[in-house]
Image (spheres, rainbow, N blue to C red):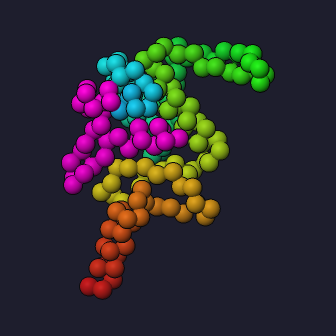
Amino acid sequence: MDTLLDLLNSRPLVNGEERDALGDPDRGRRWAREYGGEGSLEELALLCETRDILRDVVCGTSPPAALSPLLKGVHQVPEITSDGLRWMVRTPPHARLAIKVVLAWVDVEKRMPGRLRPCTNDECRLFLLDRSRANRARWCSMAVCGNREKARRHYERTR
C-alpha cells in the first residue's frame, strides 16, 4: 500500500510548481530501487504511465478498465509450497514494480473501497488512504492542507 500511495504522490505541487520524483532519471532510478525495482529507463516509463492511469482511475475520470493494457504479459502461476498452494505473479522484470502497484490498488479497492482518494484541497495533487473509522478524511495532511483549508474558511467567516 505504501508503494501505491507513494507512486500516486510522486508528482506533487510544491508552491505551485510540479516536482516529479520520476521525471529525472537519477532520482527516478533511486525511487524505483527504494521500492524494489531495477531502476531501468523502461521501468521508469512504465511507472509514469501506471501513475497517470491510476490517478485518473482514482479520481474517477477513467474507468478501472483503463489499467488493462498494463497487464499484458502478466500471468498468475500456481506454486506448491510447504504452506500449500500459492499464486505467483509472473511479469517481465521491468514491469514488476508497476504490476505490484496495480495489484496493491486492487487490494485496497477490495478491502477498503472508496478510501483511496485525492486530497480535497484544490491546490494539492496528493492522495490519501483514509484509515479512519468514520471514513471522513478529506486532506492528505491535516498539518498542511487541512490547516490551510480551515484557516481559509475561518478568514472568510470573520471578514
Residue 62 seen in the figure = no
Residue at the farthest front position: 82
Magenta stretch, residue numbers? 1-30
Q: Position of residue 18 (x, y in %)?
A: 24, 44
Residue 6 seen in the figure = yes
In which quarter of the view is residue 135 placed?
A: bottom right
Q: In the rendered view, would you say 114 is above or below 93?
A: below
Q: Position of residue 111 (x, y in %)?
A: 65, 44
Q: Could you tell whether 117 is left or right of 144 in the image?
A: right
Q: Position of residue 90 (x, y in %)?
A: 57, 15
Q: Position of residue 105 (x, y in %)?
A: 54, 37
Q: Could you tell whether 114 is left or right of 37 in the image?
A: right
Nearer to me, 12 or 60: 12
Residue appearing at x 42%, y 41% in the figure: 6
Residue appearing at x 55%, y 51% in the figure: 115
Q: In the rendered view, would you say 70 is above or below 14?
A: above
Nearer to me, 59 or 85: 85
Q: Could you tell whether 85 is left or right of 31 in the image?
A: right
Q: In the rendered view, would you say 4 is above or below 131?
A: above
In which quarter of the view is residue 132 placed?
A: bottom right
Q: Quadrant of the C terminus?
A: bottom left
User: Is residue 56 covered in magenta?
Assistant: no
Residue appearing at x 31%, y 41% in the figure: 11
Q: In the rendered view, would you say 9 is above or below 120?
A: above
Residue appearing at x 48%, y 38% in the figure: 4
